[in-house]
Each structure stands twice: as C-alpha cells, then as structure tokens.
Amino acid sequence: MITRMSQLFLRTLREDPADAEVPSHKLLVRAGYIRRAAPGVYSWLPLGLRVLRKIESIVRAEMDSIGAQELLFPALLSKEPYETTGRWTEYGDNLFRLKDRRDVDMLLGPTHEEMFTSTVKDLYSSYKDFPVTLYQIQTKYRDEERPRAGILRGREFVMKDSYSFDMDDAGLEKSYQAHRAAYQRIFDSLSIDYAICEATSGAMGGSASEEFLAYSEVGEDTFVRSTTGDYAANVEAVETLRGEERPIEGLPAAEVHDTPQAETIAALVEWAKATGFDIDASQTLKTMAIMVHQPGEEEEELKAVLLPGDRELADKRLEAALAPTEFRLAEEKDFQKYPFLVRGYIGPRAMNAHGIEVLADPRIVTGTSWLAGADEEQRHVLNLVAGRDFTVDRYVEAAGIHEGDPAPDGGTLTLARGIELGHIFQLGRKYTEAFDVKILDENGKRTIPTMGSYGIGISRMMAVLVEQNHDDKGLIWPAAVAPYQVHVAVANKDEAAVAAGDELVAALDARGIEVLFDDRPKVSPGVRFKDAELLGMPYAVILGRAFADGEVELCERGGETSEVPYDEIVDRLVGLLG
Amino acid sequence: MITRMSQLFLRTLREDPADAEVPSHKLLVRAGYIRRAAPGVYSWLPLGLRVLRKIESIVRAEMDSIGAQELLFPALLSKEPYETTGRWTEYGDNLFRLKDRRDVDMLLGPTHEEMFTSTVKDLYSSYKDFPVTLYQIQTKYRDEERPRAGILRGREFVMKDSYSFDMDDAGLEKSYQAHRAAYQRIFDSLSIDYAICEATSGAMGGSASEEFLAYSEVGEDTFVRSTTGDYAANVEAVETLRGEERPIEGLPAAEVHDTPQAETIAALVEWAKATGFDIDASQTLKTMAIMVHQPGEEEEELKAVLLPGDRELADKRLEAALAPTEFRLAEEKDFQKYPFLVRGYIGPRAMNAHGIEVLADPRIVTGTSWLAGADEEQRHVLNLVAGRDFTVDRYVEAAGIHEGDPAPDGGTLTLARGIELGHIFQLGRKYTEAFDVKILDENGKRTIPTMGSYGIGISRMMAVLVEQNHDDKGLIWPAAVAPYQVHVAVANKDEAAVAAGDELVAALDARGIEVLFDDRPKVSPGVRFKDAELLGMPYAVILGRAFADGEVELCERGGETSEVPYDEIVDRLVGLLG
C-alpha cells in the first residue's frame, strides 16, 4: 500500500510537548503518532494506530500458536464479580467506578480474571474440556495515581491478557511455560532488550510469577541481576539472604547508654565512634513505627519494622510484602496516641512489651547483637540481642537492595531499571475458588481447576520500542511494526525525478512493501529529510541531486546511508526487508 | 485455517435464554457467539468475535476506499469538550459519567464529534489540508434507558464513526455522497434488505440526514415508504401535509354544548352522533397539556399540543420536534398547579388566555373548524375555528402517521419496521463553530469548515444479519462474515470416514477456506447436525453413511442438501465460495 503524505492526517512538531519528559512521549507526540486527550489518556493518530495494530497482530499470532483462543470481554462491568473476589474494594482508588442511570455500581475493567473465571465456570463442567487458554486484546482502565510518560503508563491502555485453566499443577506449569516461550518469541522478534525477572505476586495472590522487564533508563521498575548467572528479579521479589543464627550464650549483656542528640543512624554511629565502640551502621538497629490498614477495615494498627541501620526502608518492597494490607509511616498523631514510642529512640523492647507485632529484616536473627533505641529520651542500648532481649514476630522484605548485595545464586547483585512489558503468573486457585468453579475429574470427583494469568502491555510495548530505538532526530522502528517499511521522498524538482518517484512507489507497492510517500508540494528537501528521520521508517529512499546520475540515496534509519542505482533500489529493499 | 470443535471454547444451548425476546438475541446466545455480562453489555465469545472482526474489515475496506483515514480516540474522555458543545448536559441520563480519583468529571464517549473536531482544529490550519475524512472503529457507551435484544441495542457497543471536514457546502455534499455510496456497497455486499430513509437530525443539529434501516419485524424504528416511488423516511422525519387555509368569514359561530361523560374522543364522537352532528374523530380537537424541560433549566414549562382527534400523540415524533428539549404529559400534580386545565375538557382557548404556548399539528390551520374542549367540566365547544377562536403559536410534528396517509411524493404511505444500521448526516458547522475552528481559505480569509458525520453500528449489524438470516434451527451466515465458511462433521464411525474427514479439512485449508471441524468424540450424528444448523456456517459437509459409496452430504445452510462425490467436494466448495 502507498500512503501519500499530501493526504495523510499528520502534523509533525519541531518542539517537544511541554508535559513530556521521556523520549517515547516526546517523539510519539512530535511525530504525530499519538495525541493527549486527557491526563493519561491518548488518541491514536493514523501512524500510531498502524503500529499499535501491528504489535497486536504479532502478539495475536503467538497466542494463537500456543492454542490460546481469542474472545473479548466488555470494559464496562458489573460490580458483583469483583465483589466476589474482594477486588471491588482492594483496588482502591485505582479502579474507575461509576453508577448507571439506575444507580447500579459498575466499573471499568482494570483486568479480567473475574470475567474469564466466571465464563469458564458457566461453559465448562468436565475435565475433558480442559486445559483451556483464553485471551483478549482489549482496552483497560486504571485510575493511576501518577499517569506518566505518555503511553508508558496511561489510564486507558491496550493489553493482551490471557488466562489458562488446568486441572492440575503440572498442567499449569505447562501452560505457564508455553506462555513464557511465546512471550520470549514476541519480544525477541522485535529485538527488545529485556530480562525475565522473578516477581512478587503483588495484589494478585498466587505463586510463581515472572516479569518481562525491558531495559530502560526511564523505567519505573528497579530490578536486580546477578553477576554470575541468569538470576534476575524485580526489587520487590529479591529475597534477602537470611542471617546466620548464633548462640546467645556468652554474649555480653545489654547496656543502656546516654546518646544525646543521636536521633539519626549517622549521629548514633558518630557517638559510638566517639565513645570508643567499633560499630558501623550495619550493626545498629532501626526501629520504625508503621500504621497498617487492611482493606475493608476501619481501624489502622500499629506495627514495628526493624532494619539494619545501613538500610533504608524500601516502600515498594514492604508494600509487596504486606499486600493487600497498606501501610504508612507513623506521624505526629500516632506518636501522641502511643506514648511509649519515643521518637528518635524507639527500640524493639517497648514494641514487644506493648504487644505490637514486630516485623524484621531477615538479617535480624537470633543471636545477632545490635545498638538500638532504648525507648527513653536520649538513650540507646548496646548489645541488644535478638531472641534474648527482643523478639521478632515475622520476617519481611522491607530493606532497600544495594548494588553489591549477595545474590541468591552466589553472585553479586547489580541494579538496573526497566519497564514492565509482560507478566506471567501462576495464579493458582484463588479465583476458581472464589467463584466455586467445580469440575468433574476423571474419577467423577469435583475438582477446582488452577489458573495462570498472563499479560502484555500492547500500547506500552510501543513506548518501549521507542525508548530502545530512537536517536535525537526521531523514531527508529523495527520493520515488523513500522507504520510503513519504506519512506520515499523526492528532493529534486526535475520532472524525471518526480516521475521516477511515482514509478518507484508503485513498484514497491507491487512487491508488497508498505510505502509512505512524501509527495507534499513545496516542501524543502531539508524538511523532507527531517520528517523522514522523525517519523522513523526503517528505510528511506531519497531521489535527490544524484538522481541525475541514476543514483538514489538509501538511508537505513539509525544506520548507514548509501547511493544505490535507481534500477536496483526495489530489489535491494525487497532483499533488506526479507 | 482449521478450528477443531473438540478444542473450541464453545457450549451450545438447547434452550433460549430467559431474557431473550428476539431471534438474534436468542440464537447468538444459544449458539455460543455472545454472552451477557451485565444489562446491555455482552462478551464476545470466539465465534462471535470472528464475525465482529469480519464485519469491521468489510467496513474498514470501504472507508479506506473513499479515502477516509483511520485513527482511534479514547472511550474515557474529559468533560470539557462536551461542555463546549453543551452535550455534557444534553445527553441527560444516556451519558455514562464518572469521576476520577481527583474528583475530575469524565465520561464514556457516546459519539466523538467533539474529539474529531478539536483534533482537526489542532492539526490543520489551511484550506490546502482539506477536505479530510477521518474514522474510527471503536467501542462506545450509552446508558440506554431500555437496553434490549442482546447486541441490537446495548450499552457498550462497537461503532464505526466517521467525520468529513470540507471548506464549503459543495465539498460536504461530495463527502456525504461518497459515504452514502460506501454504505450502500457495505450493506449490499452482505445482501442486507434495507431502505434509505430521510431522517430528522435528532439531538445532533444539522441539515440533510438519512438513515439506513434494515427491514425487521423486531426493529424499534417505524418508517414509511411511499407506494409510488423511492420516498422513505423514518417516522420522526415524515412531514405532515399542511392543511389548506380557508376563509374564516361566514363560518358558524362557536357554541358550547353539554357533553356529559365525554372525556374521550370516542365518547365525544358518540355524543355528536347521538346529538345529530355529522362529526367524526378527525373533526374533533385533542388538546394535550405537556410539561417541557430544557436541558440545563431547573423549571419545567407548561405547553399545549393540539392534534386532530383521530390522531394519537407520537412520542418520538414530538421528541424529535422538540429536541433537545424534553417533554412529558401533564400529571395530577400539574393539573393541581394549573387549575384552568379541566381534565377531559381541555381546549385551546384557556391555553391562549393564560399565555401558554400552543403547538399544533399542521392540519390545524386558519379556517379549520373543530369540536374541542370548552375548558369547563362536562362541556365541549362546537365550530371552534382556528385563527378566529384560538391561535396556534407553532406547528409541530407530533401526530402519529397512519398507513394510507398521503406521501409527500403524491403516493400513499405504508408503514414498515426497521433497525437503524447506519446514519449519514450533514452536520454543518455546529461543531466547528463551537470549537472555533478557523481555516485560512484561498484568499487568506478565516473560514469555518463544514462537517458530515457518519455512523455504522458494527455490533448491531451482526444482530441485523441474524434477524434477516436465520430459521427455527439456527443461524445462517453470509459467507463473507461467517466465522468459518465450511463446517465439516464426520457422522460415521468407519475408520476410512474418519481419515477422510481429516484429509478433507486439510485440503480445504490448503485452498484458503476456513473450516470448523466437528471432531468431538462420542457425539451422536443428531447432535452434530443440530449444532451445525445452530452455528450456521454457510456450507456443511457431512461424512455420513453414504461415505461407503464415496458420497458426502453437502448442506447449504438454509438451502438444498445434495450428495456429492467425496473426490469432488473440495472443488465444489471452492467454486461455491468463489
């Protein structure tokens, strides 16, 4: 097909949009692919829609190849199924809720486990119907607190979500691995640079879970890799190596010291050094008061979090560890309510004494000895031993990961930033149990099938492709998703050149190549070059001055420019586009 | 492609769903094409989604062929553009409104004039950019008061909407005609039986407007055709032939009569006959009190509607005539508020006397004489002459159309029922003016372009196809939109027949035919036949008993069944599917 730029609904911009911070947002708007309609909500202009559809087709083909069946659920949904699973409440402010004209509660689907599960329950009843994998490519809605970066994190976005239903765990593992392989084929086919990271399940509940994270400086997800192997995990999922338990016997007794003005770890270490103790931050104990809130509950509850003093609290890790329970740091009003919390000098003993649950970093094990708050103004206590002087109720992953931390595979962790492209997840029976899906197995016994849930951010993938494929001049599309494979521009007023341009686009079209033809009248060669670079088709052919000698310029976007005889250009392009 | 029913996510039902009244709703649910998710909201199961996508492709191809460019707007929209045009309010309860987490008003797009217009304004500024026609195939939302009939009138539905922008009226006419022809090609290609009806613009504002109405007994739209020509119009758009004005001089004076118990037209005619007056219902006058409500206004206002007594009030016609103002019949509380309204005996004179606006049917012209309410209990007035004894303030189309009424082209009107498939509409400058779209014309003058708006109900078209193509056994799909063109079933346990079935589907697939293969184990021939009929592929091939003689059954769905030699069946089908 041939699209003529003289007709195309397109305006390129020379300036970055004021609200754009990341390259994909800037370039997709400047190149006229997308346009902001509301905060976190974008319109797809013709070029953008073509890319989106091509990404969808690639994903669809791979889903079909693993036997997944496509269907399409509505975006506008009833509250009831989401109440059945508790997500009507759990989703909190992220859910777009609305009422219809009869004052009935409805929602815009953020994800569709409920619909898939209840539909399978309605249609299927025998083990003979299983396994079954269903998917949809659909517009989803999440009322993100901070929609950002154009289509990287929008409030209306396109997702492929699929769900597998198996009669047993072995089947689930197989479905999971089939998706994992399909996702790899999808991302590999577009040469996306990504890592497969162990992930926590977040608010979804369930067991095995991996994220496909595309490397990107502008990514919101920090993840870790091991220096010695394949281990990769998102920060929420990294498991801290548990400290080694030590015998308590023989450890020196706890002793309280005056530590004036030592309300920070740095000041405390300073005090220790000045006082002659050989103690660094990792041997001090940070005791933090947090208020936790369970969805659906009215009251908040006080809990303690213990960290080695050299670690900051990693909000997202603690969030993931506590989900769906939410937390916040204690504030002035909380300190007033609980006078045993001595600000700046909180220690674990007062928490134990008042029956407050103590959550601790896995390094704080029995027999480890700490310099901790003494629960008295201006005082700390030395040699406070876990398991002797205070008790840990539960271990949680709440501490920040540092570059150089030990990796579970024996290597060392390095940190990277990424964008979540996909997520595969052994959901288990959470949803099938909630909907009481009972299937007769081979022995006539009613069995609850087990589910996997698998998602790819289709619109986000477009942003990722731009983040990984652009330069300061514009977009650089992989041929498989480019709106057009070849951009042809005549930058020569000679009649023969103009005629040759027409002939060339017709010849390319005849060979099945999609062509964007810059046939705009009265546009300078400079503007044509600039637009070709901004729009980012993988190959541009310029009929310029050299056309007089029978040569055209072939510009590989982001690569080499060469002169090619006009007579050979079609074959050359067909060869390149393979 | 081959889809095996043993794998397909499908359950057919023998019983009609309890809430279904019309054939398309019953059959699409029973055949497992769609499934109700919420009132007026449906899920598309695999077979249904395939039909939907095929309809989309047909529409897309025709839109592309007239140079329309596809883009895609969000469904979740900001209030502001809809406030600019007043539709935030005008849409009333039909609009799904919601608030985001920051309490910002948003809506789910019921139609996208606002988005298209403001986008064109942002991108284009010169006459050289025009004309331009843009379209999208998108999910739309309307909170219908009475969602009904499955996907015939849903609250979430798929629509193709396009918009043309032209610099002048001649251009608009051209864009309009291009759409008109494209729509005809679309509906003709699927052999839909439809009429192109003159339409009113409804709440949209604007001038020329036609609806494509598919003939259907279950249609909600009543429309008329003339017995002598091409004239067709929806009932809202039929213009009543205006009565002939007559001289007032010499007409007998009005006289009040006691008409006990004559609170209905029938009773009044009865009284007249008994009293010796030669008066039929068409000579009596119905004076109705209505309360009208302008969107955005707090108060309702009383108005009178006059109709000849043989005509019922046609709600939809009056609705269209008054839009966007809404009306309701006066109720008890209104009669209490306006004591001059004497229930059962209301006449136009009290309305005139109290300054109430009088809207009248076009037959009630100066010089016509009526038997009307006397505004006194148990009394009517004879010889009440329009223009002498009472005044009409405004003529409106409010009376029902009757079979046999005169048509504007000189013929006679007949009534038919239909389903609105498409609507084309010369919008004019309503939206471009609202958004202050100013384009420099050839003379450098700022000109407001004129718009056309064109819609096709994609999901509704699927229901229409079923309404026009089914029998009591099931669906009958046109080949162009059938999920699969051929249904193959082996109803013979012989190994050779089973092997031949596998061979046949492979051979059809190799010829580019999409095949649904009933390979389900342990299903009786009867169930296979029934399902093949219910699912409605245009052709079914049954390898049954006659296979022993080298023959298979070729069943044209809704047509003939014949025996065809197995060796010839592939070529025969290729020929039939042309």
Image (cartoon, coloured by chain):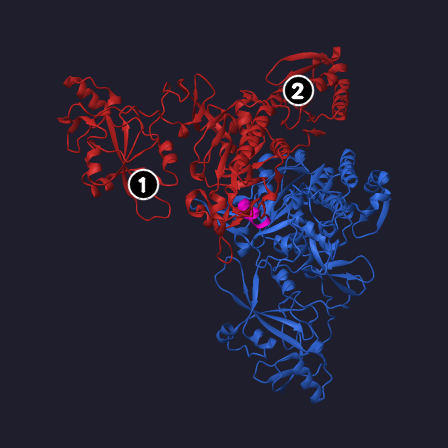
Chain colours: A red, B blue
Along the line of sight, the residue nearer the viewer: A379 or B130:
A379
Q: Identify which residue is drawn at 57% across, 60% down.
A: B325
Residue B373 lies left or right of residue B474; in this view the side is left
Q: Residue A264: horizontal and vertical position, in percent?
A: 23, 26
Along the line of sight, the residue nearer the viewer: B509 or B410:
B509
Along the line of sight, the residue nearer the viewer: A185 or B253:
A185
Q: Residue B277: horizontal and vertical position, in percent?
A: 72, 86
Whether marks 1 and 2 lie on the same chain: yes
Q: Residue A90: horizontal and vertical position, in percent?
A: 42, 44
Res. A442 in view: yes
- Give neighbour class at mark 2: few <14, some 14-19, many 20+ (Cα, 10 Å): many
Tell me, yes or no, whether the highlighted magenta stretch contains residue A117: yes
Residue bearing mark 2: A540
Q: Residue A393: horizontal and vertical position, in percent?
A: 28, 36
**Mark carried by residue B224:** none
Label 2's element? Answer: strand
As displayed, is residue B562 above or below residue A557? below
Amino acid beneath label 1: Val
Cα–Cα span, label 1 and label 2: 58 Å
**Mark carried by residue A292:** 1
Residue B247 figure quarter = bottom right
Residue B364 lies left or right of residue B356; in this view the side is right
Type of secondary structure dominating the magenta stretch: helix
Label 1's element? Answer: strand
- Give neighbour class at mark 1: few <14, some 14-19, many 20+ (Cα, 10 Å): some
| Front tag of 1 and 2 | 1
Magenta residues, start to end:
A115-123
Badge 2: chain ID? A
